[in-house]
Image (spheres, rainbow, N blue to C red):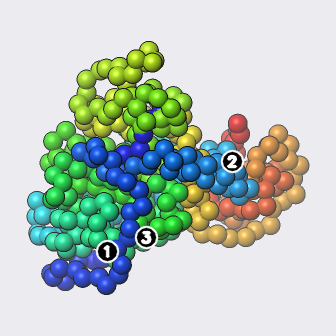
Amino acid sequence: MKFACCLSIAAALLISVSVNPIPVLSVLSADDAVCSTPSRSPAELAESEARFKLSLESSRSFSPFEKCKLRIDIPVVFHILYNGPDYVNGNLSDSDVHAQITVLNNRFSNTQFRFYLANLTRTFSDQFFRFAHVGNDNQGYMKAALRQGNEATLNIYTVAFKKKPTLNGYSTFPDSFATRPVDDGVVILYKTLPGGSQPIHNLGAIAVHETGHWLGLYHTFQGGCDGDGDFVDDTPPEDGPSYACDERDSCTNDTLPDPIHNLMDYSEDACRSDPFTPGQVTRMSQQWSAFRAKNAYPKGSQADTATIPNVDPGSHSECDFGMILKPQCSPCVAKVVGALRSCGDVLWDFDCVDLAKSLCGLTCE
């Protein structure tokens, strides 16, 4: 239990955007050597968790994602900022980006979440590339100019962090979208992508870590050894971040080793080999339902309407959702969706193949 730290090529001129920068409302952690995700005070944490519980309860009237563990396809808009023609200028290749998407999917393979590249933008801007840091005007202008999509769209920006050479990335949290939607997203050091040049952090785990924040996770060392920590019961408490890969037990009030192999610690990439814990998976699913699911649709689909067969609810009556049915979907899906009709009036449209696989063998907790 723990703490949160963590368009094409523009003209070969410095990009200039006349928009207001985005303010950062939280205080930054003093320890931002790896992750500079804005930290939250105990009062902010309490307020955020209360808002989370309230939003989760209200979302359960429409969201099928959490309870029945349906696959969630997240569109990723990847923004490459650069100031010259080569890798050292941040000019990443398409294959670099695809490699990072692959790592995201591999590391989230024990969750509901899957990621696909919806768009790739390239922006020549020395100012954004070198000086976009959490909370400053440059990152505010950058996001205001480039961000795409709604709360269910993951925007990732790659920059250089020239004023903070040890900084690898930062993110926003799901509940921040309501008040600061343009600020939503993940910013990472371009060198941290798979095969990059950042020592000990070049396997793509930084983007995974920051996406964990974007989906509602705090650091494993949140709050140190006491209190609610990261609000996840199966991550042992930890007094502070791990920067290498040395086994340790920093909290004397428990008998468990520190979770140095967890993706939400600061250990070197190769050390963070554990999958997300069941508690972390549940929290991300619930945070999605509470703050990001309302306008989420899977890859290639959009909201639609259909006639739902009137089938006896049977053993699935405990489920709290319905599904939109497209005509081309299989009879198996029609039968199961009909059985779920009494569970909810707000309907959702999913890719037919995934829908059939998910629902025809569906079991709800």
Q: CA distance from mark 1 to mark 3?
A: 10 Å
The tag earlier along the polypeptide, 1 or 3, is 1
Residue 359 shows which numbered tag?
Answer: 2
43 on left or right of 191: right
When asked about the image quadrant of residue 256, the answer is top left
Query: Where does the image place residue 28, in percent across and percent down from the top left?
Result: 34, 52
Residue ID at (41%, 44%): 4
- The secondary structure type at the circle numbered 3 is helix
Amino acid carrying label 3: it is: Val
- The answer to whether 353 appears left or right of 73 in the picture is right
Choose mark 2 or mark 3, whichever is in front: 3
Say few, some or many: other residues with alpha carbon within 10 Å of mark 1 (under 14 / 14 to 19 / 20 or more). many
Residue that carries the numbered disc 3 in the rendered image: 182
Q: What amino acid type should be assigned to the residue bearing mark 1?
A: Tyr
Q: Is residue 331 left or right of residue 15?
A: right
> Element at badge 2?
helix
Which disc is residue 102 wearing? none
Give the crowd class for mark 3: few <14, some 14-19, many >=20 residues within 10 Å: many
Q: Secondary structure at mark 1?
A: helix
In the image, residue 96 sits, relative to residue 105, either above or below, namely below
